[in-house]
């Protein structure tokens, strides 16, 4: 009887050891899901978010410039005190560090360029279009692999002023994403190329108060987005190292409430403005999901549960804008994510705006 017990214990210990070795030698299942699911979705979200924030910055500056020119001689009932049309170019660099949870952690470096143009249809109504190109290089922890993302997004935006100090901003965008992923497995590399698309719509309600050189006011934002990632099959020297994954859709409903403030200093050459903002963000959707995948060589199916989103975070920013009397602006901005339980992100951007 004792020999049977010892044999049973040895079998349990051996099975546990083999399971530990398998987990150590084959992290590719976890890595695959990270590449094909949340990482791909997060890359799409970053591309859409970049265009949205670039356009929001553009509209914020137009409001401030409009107020300055009106105070210096314009009239609310006449033709817009701003030039009827303008354009902007914005360059951005971001870095993201994501901790390992159910999905492996990674480091991402993102470069983006947004070009847009807009015009006033009447004094209190502006419409515009923007195009954003985005390059995202993601490297996973423990040399598990990497994911390269190229994205292009087109957005239509506008702002309407019911009164001189209130506004409604809107943006609707559609983006195309191209992914190239690589997983490092023992003595092999599994690779895949696949596509994604992202649709988004956002609206912002706000009001500003002015006191001398200072302005401040609340902002209420809502953004809906839907990301679709296509199904794909990996290639590898050994098909037992390759995986097939189903396509999927992810929806996001993001609400934000915050406050912005600015200070204006008149200069001989124009106006210098410093500004700051702080927003609380809450995600209502984007829940953890079971992802279905299949080993190409063996046909063995498997499932994986993704991470839950961090539903409540804060986003802060600081910036400076130099405005020439001719309508030429140069600006820079730093943005930081706060309070996220497993992700750290900071962004720096700058660019120029020109009025015609």
Image: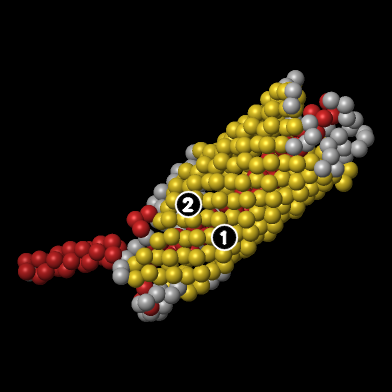
The residue lying at 36 percent from left, 65 percent from top is 184
Picture quarter containing residue 15?
bottom left
The residue lying at 89 percent from left, 32 percent from top is 76
Determine the secondary structure under disc 2: strand
Quarter of the image with the C terminus is top right
Which residue matches tag 2?
Answer: 108
Residue 69 x %, y %: 82, 30
Taking depth in this image into account, of 44 and 117 the one nearest to the observer is 117
Q: Is disc 1 in contact with disc 2, using a CB cutoff of under 8 Å? A: no
* Residue 150 badge: 1
Numbered marks: total:
2
The residue sitting at the left extreme is 2
* Residue 209 badge: none
Picture quarter containing residue 83?
top right
Indicate which disc, 1 or 2, sits on the residue closer to the N terminus: 2
Query: How many residues crowd mark 1 within 10 Å: few (<14), some (14–19), many (20+)?
Result: many
> Does 258 appear above or below 239?
above
The residue lying at 63 percent from left, 59 percent from top is 152
The answer to whether any part of residue 80 appears in the image is: yes
Marks 1 and 2, how far apart at CA: 13 Å
Quarter of the image with the N terminus is bottom left
The residue lying at 69 percent from left, 54 percent from top is 131
Residue 151 x %, y %: 60, 59
Residue 248 x %, y %: 55, 66
The answer to whether any part of residue 101 appears in the image is: no
């Amino acid at each position: 009887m004792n020999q049977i017990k010892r044999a049973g214990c040895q079998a349990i210990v051996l099975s546990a050891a083999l399971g530990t070795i398998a987990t150590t030698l084959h992290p590719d299942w976890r890595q695959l899901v990270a590449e094909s699911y949340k990482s791909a979705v997060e890359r799409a979200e970053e591309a859409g978010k970049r265009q949205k924030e670039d356009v929001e910055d553009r509209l914020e500056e137009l409001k401030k410039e409009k107020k300055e020119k009106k105070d210096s001689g314009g009239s609310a009932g006449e033709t817009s005190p701003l030039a009827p049309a303008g354009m902007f170019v914005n360059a951005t660099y971001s870095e993201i560090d994501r901790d390992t949870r159910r999905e492996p952690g990674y480091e991402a470096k993102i470069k983006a360029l947004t070009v847009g143009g807009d015009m006033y249809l009447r004094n209190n109504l502006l419409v515009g279009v923007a195009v954003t190109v985005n390059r995202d290089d993601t490297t996973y922890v423990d040399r598990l692999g990497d994911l390269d993302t190229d994205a292009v997004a087109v957005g239509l935006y506008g702002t309407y002023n019911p009164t001189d100090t209130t506004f409604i901003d809107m943006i609707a965008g559609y983006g195309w994403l191209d992914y190239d992923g690589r997983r490092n497995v023992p003595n092999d590399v599994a690779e895949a190329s696949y596509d994604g698309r992202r649709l988004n719509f956002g609206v912002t309600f706000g009001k500003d108060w002015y006191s001398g050189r200072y302005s401040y006011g609340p902002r209420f934002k809502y953004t809906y987005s839907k990301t679709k990632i296509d199904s794909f099959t990996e290639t590898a020297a050994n098909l037992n190292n390759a995986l097939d994954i189903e396509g999927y859709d992810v929806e996001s409903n993001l609400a934000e409430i915050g406050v912005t403030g600015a200070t204006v200093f008149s200069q001989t050459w124009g106006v210098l403005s410093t500004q700051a903002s702080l927003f609380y963000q809450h995600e209502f959707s984007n829940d953890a999901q079971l992802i279905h995948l299949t080993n190409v060589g063996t046909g063995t199916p498997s499932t994986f549960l993704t991470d839950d989103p961090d539903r409540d975070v804060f986003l802060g920013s600081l910036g400076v804008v130099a405005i020439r009397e001719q309508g030429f602006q140069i600006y820079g901005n730093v943005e930081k994510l706060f309070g996220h339980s497993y992700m750290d992100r900071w962004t720096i951007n700058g660019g120029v705006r020109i009025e015609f």
